[in-house]
Image (tube, grey):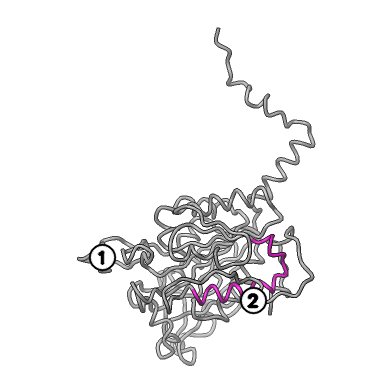
Amino acid sequence: MTAADLPMPGLALVPRTDEKQSAKDFKTDQEVRWCPGCGDYAILAAVQGFLPELGLRKENIVFVSGIGCSSRFPYYMDTFGMHSIHGRAPAIATGLALTRPDLSVWVITGDGDALSIGGNHLIHALRRNVNLKILLFNNRIYGLTKGQYSPTSETGKVTKSTPLGSLDHSFNPVSLALGAEASFVARTMDSDRKHLTEVLRRAAAHEGTALVEIMQNCNIFNDGAWESLKDSETSDDRMIRLEDGQPVVFGKDASKAVVRGADGHIVVANTADVDDWEIIHYDSHADDPGLAFALSRLADVHSLDNTAVGVFRDVQRPAYDRMVREQVASVRANGEGDLQALLQGKDTWTVH
């Protein structure tokens, strides 16, 4: 399946091109400057390889980034772009989406940029459901400033800023997004090109805010942060791949299954020990995000056992920018667009 096979309400107003495009069309003449082996290279290649599927004019695509290693991204994309300020990329991107429905607006951010100084901007973009695609590169460390712990670093993490081990309880980006009422939430891996591309397709098609957490390696300051999910010897037994309409099973030969425990919470069981009807079937389009939230909490933050990946939530609700445009159009149609009268309304007095 490609993007052309999907309905694309999130891009309905963005002009298309009839010109055949390739990944090369989205590469700039700038030297890509990340540390050799950084996971950012894989994500950049995946995005450049995927964008031609959308068939959009390059001048109608915008990448907005904040501050961090990932935020170099706009320099390497032959589209419009902005390297903005720390944590504020969602706010700037919101302004673009509100005023320019002809643009496909993407936000590039990291776990520090998005979840620390940018936390409020992120959650409000999610709850408003602005038509943005937010790619959150999560390497569980501050890489640009040389290795301090981040909001996603695990408790006990020893870094330059936590020499005795971090005392902070870490954020789970997917849980956070679901709690903020995001209408599209997904998680994928930098080195899994096929899965990453499939998630990007669905995010691009979505109208509203789509948050994609990308587990990404920083081989200099936090090498191997996701190694047990990348290692072919251990990944099958640790990673749960969510697929709509399918039973939630994983492990070699589907030996493990997710079921409801006696207390109503979901638990991992041996597939051989449960009946087929007990195994949970997943639906990212469900109105209630409760199961998605529970699945996002299954993972052990240290061992990474039971880490779910895929699209957790994909539901339709009105996009904020569309509603704003409709509201403005309604006011104008009714002849109510007198700004001066609004400014000098009931709460304005003349003092003599």
Give the amino acid type for the residue marked by disc 2 in the picture.
Ala
Q: For residue 23, which numbered disc appears in the image?
A: 2
Q: For residue 59, which numbered disc appears in the image?
A: none
Q: Is residue 42 magenta?
A: yes
Of residue 156 and residue 240, the one placed in the foreground of this image is 156
| Quadrant housing residue 67 | bottom left
Q: Residue furthest left?
A: 164
What segment is highlighted magenta in the picture?
Answer: 41-61
Kindly identify the residue that appears in the image at 68 percent across and 57 percent down. 103
Left or right of 179 in this view: 320? right
Give the amino acid type for the residue marked by disc 1 in the picture.
Lys
Of residue 67 and residue 307, the one placed in the foreground of this image is 67
> Crowdedness of circle 2 by 10 Å Cα count: few (<14), some, many (20+)?
some
Kindly identify the residue that appears in the image at 79 percent across and 70 percent down. 18
Location of residue 23 with respect to 291 vertically, above or below: below
> Crowdedness of circle 1 by 10 Å Cα count: few (<14), some, many (20+)?
few
Residue 229 image offset from top left, x and y in percent: 42, 81
Contact between labelled residues 2 and 1, with CB atoms less than 8 Å apart: no
Mark 2: secondary structure: helix
Which SS does the magenta portion mostly show? helix
